[in-house]
Amino acid sequence: MSLNQPENLQAMESLRSLCHIVAVPYPGRGHVNPMMNLCKLLCSKTPNIVISFVVTEEWLGFISSDDKPVNVQFRTIPNVIPSELDRATNFPAFLEAVLTKMEAPFEELLDRLELPVAAIIADTYVAWTVQVGQRRNIPVASLWTMSASVFSIFHHFNLLVQNHHFPADLSVEQGNDRVDYIPGLTPICLADLPTILYGSDRQVLHHALDSISSVPKAQYLLFTSVYELEFQVIDVFKANLPFPVYAIGPSIPYLDLKQPCSTTSLNGPDYLQWLDLQPRGSVLYVSLGSFLSVSAAQMDEIVAGVQDSGVRYLWVSRGDSSRFKDCCGSQGVVVPWCDQLRVLCHSSVGGFWTHCGFNSTLEAVYAGVPMLTFPIFMDQNPNSKQIVEDWKVGWRVKKNKVGEGEHVVSREEIADLVRRFMDFESMEQMEMRKRAGKVGETCQKAIAKGGSTDTNLDAFIKDISERHHH
């Protein structure tokens, strides 16, 4: 049957009203997740957005079964970068490949896409997208998946150099120097700067600085943070960048919390059933991140310390769980994976032992859960500082940050710290819980109708749609 004219026109019209966005995350778990969460938010806002989500074939294998909106389609490029499974063995080489090898296959993919592209949303670390956008006259929104404060540290790197704080000297004399000249930041000591600013690995630092220097050539900057959490820093960039700057966070999967748990058993997975049986606020949730971890010696002390504290715990351990002597006893449960945001939002959870990756930090802040911070790498140090000193919703596990090299925190110190941290009879902890609750409310307000995130998302969508249809 032939399509009669009006329907054909209608089809043309509806195609024309579609806003096609190409999303390009940096290939790492802490980057793919916030990009997907942003895509979910955009799709929940308006039905006429379609998104091509670009990953390598290997990454498609990891995420193809994840929940995603129907309006999001995975599109792949070949595996032109080292495998995710051993990227930690040579991280500089991995980064080099991301920055140099992905651009050509990405352009070939763009040529094959059926719909014209209204905008590219690309992780700041896949900086070549900015040039691709320029060549093709497609606006690029740079998505920064770390804190706005860390963005400011990198963006103002030259100030560290001018003040003789780079290369950072973490000796006892210097490590506690306060850096008080980074726009938008409260004073921060040298030891709390991102780890790539000290130590031997200049290659990674240069890649990071190169990526950040591409941002002013983009058309938008998106922060996965929440405006109210970092307004002083975000205001600096709103004032100084020649294009819209939007905080659209927390880009964590809070929309998924509305759906019931998708599992085989009726009441959700075993660990959630176990949590249901624990007293309110009594469980310490422990997760040590998905990329880099602590030394075996330190791990043994952490496990022993938490177990000796007598505090209830839910522990995500990706490695072997032979370290746990009473693996699934009454005191604690050890799982290889869990739905982290759902766990943090559970009323039995009263604390979170974390490496302070920014996504985990945002999830804890959203859930109103106080944190024990144990940063290791990259942006985890400054995140820990924000949690403890600026928002005052956590304690540091490692007190001595400088001059000692790899100091192992003993099980006795850890047991004592965990006991005090989870003691909610104490005034100090009641106060901290209250503050954590308040910060959580701030996030809830931001994403509610008329809140800062809600308004920013609307403005961003309106802007790219209008640009596209003119």
Image (cartoon, rainbow, N blue to C red):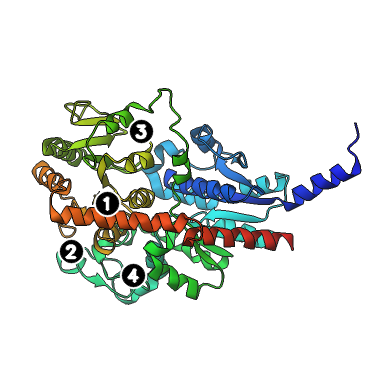
How many residues crowd mark 4 within 10 Å: few (<14), some (14–19), many (20+)?
Answer: many
Circles 2, 4 touching at the beta carbon (< 8 Å): no
Q: Which mark is residue 192?
A: none
Q: Is residue 372 above or below residue 70?
A: below
Circles 3, 1 touching at the beta carbon (< 8 Å): no
How many residues crowd mark 1 within 10 Å: few (<14), some (14–19), many (20+)?
Answer: many
Which is nearer the N-term, disc 2 or disc 4? 2
Which is nearer the N-term, disc 4 or disc 1? 4
Foreground mark, 1 or 2, reads 1
Q: Nearer the viewer, residue 459 or 206?
A: 459
Mark 2–mark 4 Cα distance, whole angstroms, equals: 23 Å
Mark 3–mark 1 Cα distance, whole angstroms, equals: 20 Å
Q: Is residue 377 above or below residue 290?
A: below
Foreground mark, 4 or 1, reads 4
Q: Which mark is residue 375?
A: 1
Q: Amino acid at mark 1?
A: Pro
Viewed as shown, does residue 205 lie left or right of 328?
right
Mark 2–mark 3 Cα distance, whole angstroms, equals: 38 Å
Mark 3–mark 4 Cα distance, whole angstroms, equals: 35 Å
Residue 129, given in percent of the width and then of the height, sits at: 58, 56
Residue under pointer 4: 185
Viewed as shown, does residue 394 lie left or right of 83?
left
Residue 25, given in percent of the width and then of the height, sits at: 52, 49
Residue under pointer 3: 337
Residue 27 shows in the view: no
Residue under pointer 2: 171
How many residues crowd mark 3 within 10 Å: few (<14), some (14–19), many (20+)?
Answer: few
Image point (26%, 39%), residue name: 348
Disc 4 is placed on an element classified as loop
Q: Amino acid at mark 4?
A: Leu
Residue 412, given in percent of the width and then of the height, sits at: 8, 43
